[in-house]
Image (cartoon, rainbow, N blue to C red):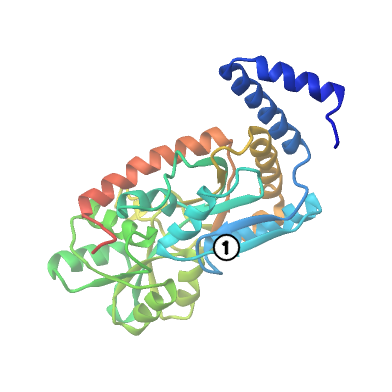
Amino acid sequence: MNRPSRTRRVLLVRTASLAPAAVALLAGGLSAQAALAQSSAWPRQAVRMIVPYSPGTGADILARTLGTRLSERWAQPVVVENRVGASGNIGTASVARAAPDGYTLLMNVNSHVINKSVFKDTGYDPVRDFAPVSLTAWGRLMLVANAGTGLRTANDLVKEARANGGRFNYASPGIGTPHHVAMEFFKQQTGIELLHVPHKATAGAVADLVGGQVQVMFLPIHVAMAQVRAGRLNALGIGSPKRDPSAAEVPTLAEQGLKNIDTDMWYGLLVPAATPREIVGALNRAVVEIMALPEVRTGLAKQGLDATTSTPEAFGKLIEADLMRWQRVVEQAKISASD
């Protein structure tokens, strides 16, 4: 029978004589050392980046842009996985449950915080269950109308909606999506009434908007401008503090006198909450360097995404502030996924 070495026998004897609390402390110390050793060699295998939305969305574009360059940097595969369903909750919850070892990442949009107020049970807590890594971009929503409505500006919509209550319907890709809460925020700030017609995805909502079954909608700029330039939709305004370079001819809502309507969407990278700080720091440095590359910034700008980075701490503060901000909008609009 194999016998333990002298060093191991001494350790076993000494450990057996320790009080339970001391044993736990020793074990914790060894675990911390193991985590530190693991993080210093990270990554040693393929990394998964979960996108809780379908291909072609802003989060997907960012994940694939970032993933390609991280793979080159690390000489390890970065596999982008679209895990869709329940307005992003399925994919997001899967990351919350993943091992906190740096091999499962999450690229998300501000639905990450909106969903907590919309759903009774998301399967995760947007603050407690994740460690923020960095912002990756800001995306802008454009208010658009079916060309047949004759609406040319956001003020046209406000004027017509006030004069003819119930005349206009608006589409969204689903209850609680950024498109949905952005329009409810617009309604609250302007005092108009519009009927919400939720869809199961952006493609169906756009098809009904172009076909005239619904009249208006907030859309990401990279989706909206293709239809605007084809003459199917009219651009009414951008819900952002500044114009977007990819649609520089379209004024902001604020420029039209509609103040304090900021519907910008943040995108960012997160990991499971207990991921070692050394891995979070290494990830943050890599993201900051990659998103600063001119070709990355230019490529994203063409799709209406403004490449932006931050410290993990600053991103965490944004998440907490945005959680409260959209909670107020959701509560006032009485938005619920059970509707």
Residue at coordinates 45% horizontally, 38% vertically from top-left?
Answer: 128
Q: Name the foreground residue: 119 vs 334.
A: 119
Q: Residue at point 44% right, 40% down?
A: 127
Residue 142 left/right relative to 51: left
Query: What residue occupies the far front of the structure in this picture?
Result: 1
The answer to whether residue 262 of the structure is visible from this angle is no
Answer with the quarter of the image where residue 63 lies.
Answer: bottom right
What residue is shown at x 25% (from left), y 66% (from top)? Answer: 157
Q: Classify mark 1: residues with Cα within 10 Å, few (<14), some (14-19) or many (20+).
A: many
Q: Is residue 152 left or right of residue 160?
A: right
The answer, for residue 71, to whether it is visible in the render is yes
Above or below, 95 relative to 236: above
Give the quadrant of residue 17. Answer: top right
Left or right of 65 on screen, residue 196: left
- Kindly identify which residue carries mark 1: 60
Q: Amino acid at mark 1?
A: Asp
- Residue in front for this viewpoint, 44 or 114: 44
- The percent position of residue 82, horizontal first and vertical second, equals 56, 65
Q: Residue at x 66, y 36 (%)?
A: 281
Q: Which element carries disc 1, helix, strand or loop? A: helix
Please identify the quadrant where the N terminus is shown.
top right
Percent of width and height locating residue 47: 69, 54
